[in-house]
Image: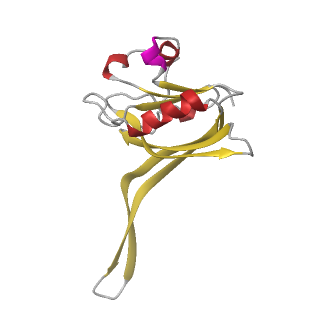
């Protein structure tokens, strides 16, 4: 896959584009984990989307049994990122910070995290007042005999307004 970025926003960086964060101040660079092969490799992105479909069973006075299904809207939407990290000294420290930091701000009430990937814009989400991502869980491990390649899996939970015709794309 091409380069991708997992990032978080603060109230001060709401208007910055992701490229500006990557090339910005030291503090802004710490807001981003860049998948930039060969050191960090994003292997897969998976979206899970679920509707809340409720079944209601009834029997009328004649004994006719009926089953109604009702669409109660969105149940959940989440993204799973899988990959490898080689830069343990910097990137694992970033990930540990990401998973323990406050996942919302006064402005970003649905989540501060976003994700940009160059060749799969459908999966991109940039946090706004109406939507965002939070780290639901994270798994870190290592592959191989030498501890030089760490495997990573992050589940990002989507919060906020989901617009059917919108993929959540962000600008560059």
Q: Which of 137 and 20 lies nearest the eye of the viewer?
A: 137
Report x, y in % for residue 101.
Answer: 36, 35
Q: Residue at left 43%, top 32%?
A: 113
Residue 132 is a magenta residue? no
Q: Is residue 125 left or right of residue 160?
A: right
Q: Residue furthest left?
A: 106
SS majority, magenta: helix
* Whether residue 136 can be seen here: yes
Report x, y in % for residue 126.
Answer: 44, 28
> Based on the displayed image, in which of its 4 quarters is residue 142 positioned?
top right
Q: Is residue 35 left or right of residue 63?
A: right
Q: Residue at left 43%, top 33%?
A: 97
Q: Residue furthest front?
A: 146
Q: Residue at left 69%, top 27%?
A: 37
* Whether residue 44 can be seen here: no
Q: Is residue 8 above or below residue 43?
A: above
**The N terminus lies in quadrant:** top right
> Based on the displayed image, in which of its 4 quarters is residue 16 positioned?
top left
Q: Is residue 15 left or right of residue 1?
A: left
Residue 27 is a magenta residue? yes
Specify the segment rendered in magenta.
Answer: 25-29
> Based on the displayed image, in which of its 4 quarters is residue 162 positioned?
top left
Q: Which of 166 and 141 lies nearest the eye of the viewer?
A: 141
């Amino acid at each position: 896959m091409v380069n991708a970025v997992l990032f978080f926003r603060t109230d001060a960086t709401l208007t910055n584009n992701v490229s500006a964060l990557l090339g910005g101040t030291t503090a802004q660079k710490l807001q981003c984990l860049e998948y930039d092969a060969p050191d960090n490799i994003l292997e897969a992105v998976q979206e899970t989307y679920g509707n809340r479909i409720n079944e209601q069973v009834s029997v009328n006075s004649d004994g006719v049994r009926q089953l109604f299904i009702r669409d109660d809207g969105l149940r959940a939407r989440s993204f799973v990122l899988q990959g490898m990290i080689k830069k343990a000294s910097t990137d694992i420290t970033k990930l540990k910070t990401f998973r323990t930091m406050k996942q919302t701000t006064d402005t970003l009430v649905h989540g501060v995290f976003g994700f940009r990937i160059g060749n799969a814009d459908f999966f991109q989400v940039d946090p706004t007042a109406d939507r965002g991502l939070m780290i639901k869980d994270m798994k870190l491990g290592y592959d191989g005999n030498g501890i030089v390649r760490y495997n990573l899996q992050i589940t990002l939970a989507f919060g906020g307004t989901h617009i059917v015709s919108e993929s959540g794309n962000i600008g560059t």
